[in-house]
Amino acid sequence: MKILVAIKRVIDPDARIRLNADSSGVEEESVEYKVNPFCENAIEEALVLQGAHGGEVVLVTVGPEDVTQTIRSGLAMGADRAIRIEGVDTELDSDLVARILHKVVERESPNVILLGKQAVDGDNNQVGQLLAQYMGASQACFASEVVLEGEQAKVTREVDGGLETISIPLPAVITADLRLNEPRYASLPGIMKAKRKPIDVLTLDELGVTDTALKIEVLSLELPPERQAGSMVESVDDLLDKLKNEARVL
Amino acid sequence: MFTEEHDMIRDTVRKIIERDINPYVEEWEKEGHFPAHQVMKLFGDAGLLGLKYSEEYGGADLDYTYCVAMAEELGEIACGGVPLAVGVQTDMCTPALARFGSDELREQYLRPSLTGEMVGCIGVSESSAGSDVASIKTTARRDGDDWVINGEKMWITNGYQADWMCCLVNTSDDKPHKNKSLILIPMDAKGVDRSRKLDKLGMRSSDTAQIFFDNVRVPAGNLIGQQGWGFFYQMLQFQEERLWGAANMIRGLENAVSETIEYTRGRSAFGKSILDNQVVHYRLAELSTEIEALRALTYRATELYVKGQDVTRLASMAKLKAGRLGREVADSCLQYWGGMGFMWEAKIARLYRDVRLASIGGGADEIMLGIICKMDGTLPKRKKGGA
């Protein structure tokens, strides 16, 4: 069983973000990066599946050299090795990432490809689905439970109406929802071992990705409006009045 | 000084705190109790209780920079009592056992303490001997193959839940610095009475006990290291204890300042936010500067310490500054929280209560000042025969 987990780093979601001078992107000076939380669920699931079925867990990410730290924290959780594809965040969109991952899948031939359902920065929720399309493989997105049975994966998905359980043939793309599992902490022995685990670095050329055109062009970003100050009301009647006539929610 | 591994250790510590500790702190503070074994196991399972100890007993053989990084991150815990308990386990009750204890003793007590299965405590202070360690009264006398211990220990962190104590006792009538020994006492031994859990100003969730020993018998092999060397062993670990204490203070103070900024930004009085008053934002900037200075001093002392230098002076300064600055930051921030800050449950009020201990425990501010003066050659010589 070989499991490929595609991971992404995101700017610390708890940090206050600022836009750069021309509002074309987020200010990246002195920000802290973390592994996207859904990607941590994906890594955890891969490790759980590896525990049950044996095999290898391989991480892959696209980014400049400093994403190595993100990779190491995944290796510290217990993944066996990693691949970093050279890339620059601003020169990527979901479609290009999916096409890059498709090439990686062709090289690695994994049985299962796990991703987070979306990254909490752009919240695009596209890469898993696009990758499955490019591979011509089955997909099960928003997974809250994954069971491997022979050449099939039985996946419980969180959908609008509740839970849906589907059976899909391997190799397949599965994207992790938050309730899939509780990611483990990287233990100290894990952290120390991570240093010695191999990280292969490939360029887009080496991978055979020639078309690097983006399908999405970011025109500008804006911050959400500042929250207005609240006010105290004298009585329940005042509150009802305000809810009816000012907020118009009643 | 710090590497990617340090960062990852910090990250793991923070995750444990966010997920398994901070959600329960309110409850523990209210109960005046936290589940020490459960919390210790969290860190033990992640391999974080034995950073500096030998791999032979389940440690990781890392240098003290890792311990300082962990101590700093433990400051993310939303109270002072829980990090203190972890610090006692990693840096106060175990160092002498790890360095000088017999193989049997280390196997029996150090190993399970590094996995978090056992909780330890350190018994030095007594009702009539706190910072003046030399004047403790508890005794141990040899009787056949046993030590028989009599006396009392006071303000013992983890004391109520601990499985064992590293206890400083007098083992002869020799001079006060030469008559002391460290003896490991299993807390379930007959004659150990820990009936009183102390009611304290701060560190509410920490279980702090007064413990009495009435003819407590422990095997002769429970002596840690050599007889008569207890005072010296205790002194040996003070540099690390003080660095730990200083590092553990930093994050709590930073959080207090940033939470005060958020609060005062959102609260208005006299037509503008509290934060917009120059006295407030200037004061908070001043405090942030001081906290960074404390961090710089702590890091510098740590860096020299791992290079093998004696940093007694710098470590004492760091501990002194941490205690003083903790009080200053807590007091200034509480002021800007106004009536909200005066509420018992307010986080800033908890910090105000908890940091007060830093200037008292582990050698009071005045002891630190005495040490610094001694090393700077400004301490007046004692007259012979004087106290």
Image (spheres, coloured by chain):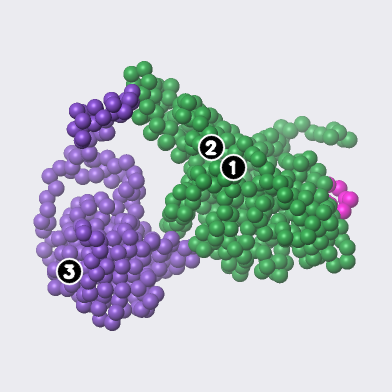
**What tint does the image give chain B?**
green
- Counting other residues with Cα less than 10 Å from the Cα at mark 1, is it few (<14), some (14-19), or many (20 or more)? many
Q: CA distance from mark 3 to mark 2?
A: 52 Å
Q: Amino acid at mark 3?
A: Ala
Which subunit holds the residue at mark 2?
Answer: B
Which subunit holds the residue at mark 3?
Answer: A
User: Residue A49: x percent and y percent?
Assistant: 35, 73
Tell me the number on the disc at residue B350: 2
> Can the viewer see residue A195 in this picture?
no
Is B177 a magenta residue?
yes
Residue farthest to the top, as pictured: B270
Q: Residue A87 appears in which quarter of the rendering?
A: bottom left
Q: Locate residue A67 relative to residue B115 in the image: left or right.
A: left
Q: Tell me if label 1 and label 3 are in contact, CB under 8 Å.
A: no
The residue under the point 20% across, 28% down is A246
Chain letter for the purple colouring in the rendering: A
Q: Is residue B263 above or below residue A175?
A: above
The residue under the point 12% across, 66% down is A210
Magenta part of the protein: which range? B172-179
Residues tagged by mark 2 and mark 1 found on one chain of the structure: yes
Q: Is B197 in front, or is A220?
A: B197
Q: Tell me if label 2 and label 1 are in contact, CB under 8 Å.
A: yes
> Pointer 3: what residue?
A132
User: Residue B365: x percent and y percent?
Assistant: 66, 36
Q: Locate residue A24 relative to residue A30 in the image: left or right.
A: left
Q: CA distance from mark 2 to mark 1?
A: 9 Å
User: Residue B68: x percent and y percent?
Assistant: 54, 50
> Pointer 1: what residue?
B204
In the picture, the quarter occupied by the N terminus of chain A is bottom left
